[in-house]
Image: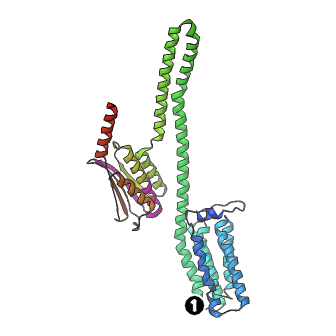
Amino acid sequence: MSYTQCGERPTRLRLRSWRSVFRDKDHGWSPLLMVLYLGFFFVQPVMDHVGLRMWLLDILGALIFIVFYFGLFVLENPWPLANIVGMLLLGIVYLPLNAGGCTFFIYAAAMVPFCVDTQIAAVVGLVTIGSVGAVEGLLLHMSGWAIFYAAIFPMMIGGGNTFFAERNRMNSRLRKANEEIEHLAKVAERERIARDLHDVLGHTLSVITLKSELAGKLIDRDPERARKEIREVEETSRQALSDVRDAIRGYRAKGLAAELAQAKATLETAGVNVQCDAATTLQIPAMQESVLSLAVREGVTNVVRHARAANCRLRVEQQNGSCRLEIQDDGQGFVTMEGNGLRGMRERVEMLGGRLERRNESGTRLVITLPLKELRAKEMSATDEGGRN
């Protein structure tokens, strides 16, 4: 079970493979790290030097917990909620025997926000777990600290996790929206290509067929007329080939404008207000346009995933022989270390003699400047030499 799948309601038991669990985009390998906190359950047995019987009971409880714990990631709803209840019951059973039983309350509270659909449901679950821990602690006449770790501390941990759970749900909705947008775009593109090819080839092929049949009938009676028809067939087929190439060029060349439109749609889907300023008469060489398109895609992805921004501005302008791309958001800023995406973006920009600047000004401001004059002169020179040759 992925954290982001908790809102789904399969009608039958479904299992996920371990490979898919550890490749999940939201939690990755963290399940293996978080299970290490189970060690606190064994603190009291070690300190009190309990006997073999108690050790066996504690080990049995830990093994049962591990089944419940990993069941959260492998099983899909509604089974994860049953695992949460199992953890809570383990805490109720073991707290009188081992003060470390509060660990089970903490795990249950930490996982509840990821296994419900809304923050309200998460709060209800946390209050329930905290109330059970508090009541049991009072009935057992436990110390204030023991009641704190059985009731208050689990609710604190779970309250913090509600934010991450909501973020995971938002990322899941965003991924689904992007997948749907991409699917619809592909469908629309296939339909456009089908229409274009039908318009380009339908009439042309019919003309070629008719002229070929006519030339076949005239080849004995009027060879000159037949040769004329064959020449027209050749000209028509060449024109059809040129039209097909134009149609193919039309859907292969996505370009910076299309990338900006896609970026705007992605940000709006994520609930970010977008201001997009781009001149309609930009003349950018293909290589620079490709780099800028990739930069827009990576920059917007970072805004959606990490910035937690409410507003974002995209600006593209051409001046003084260079093109300038600016992506600015009002989010939480950035960390010092660059990730692989940003590092690859910087390398592509610098390979073209450009400059990438990243600033923290009430959010993040990414500015990419690419020179155009020198490369354009080289391209024109190469074109002229090719023409002379």
Q: Residue furthest left?
A: 320
Quarter of the picture holding the C terminus: top left
Q: Would you place residue 160 above or below residue 39 in this image?
A: above
Is residue 6 visible in the rendered image? The answer is no
Report crowding for label 1: few under 14, some 14 to 19, many 20 or more residues within 10 A (C-alpha): few
* Residue type at the position of mark 1: Gly
Q: Coloring scheme of the render?
A: rainbow
- Nearest the eye: 369 or 333: 369
**Residue 315 is covered by the magenta coloring:** yes
| Picture quadrant of residue 54 | bottom right
In the image, residue 158 lies at what x, y percent? 56, 75
- Where is residue 187 drawn, in percent x and y? 56, 42
Residue 55: horizontal and vertical position, in percent? 70, 87
Residue at image position (33%, 32%) is 387
Farthest residue toward the right? Answer: 53
Quadrant location of the N terminus? bottom right
Q: Is residue 236 left or right of residue 326?
A: right
Residue at the far top: name it.
221
Asked which secondary structure carries label 1, the reply is: helix
**Residue wearing tag 1:** 144
Whether residue 160 is visible here, answered yes or no, is yes
Q: Is 282 a magenta residue? A: no
Locate residue 36 relative to residue 356 in the image: left or right: right
**Residue 280 versus residue 36 in the image, above or below:** above
131 and 205: which is toward the camera: 205
Q: Which residues are magenta?
A: 297-324
Quarter occupied by residue 335? bottom left
Residue 97 % position (x, y):
69, 88
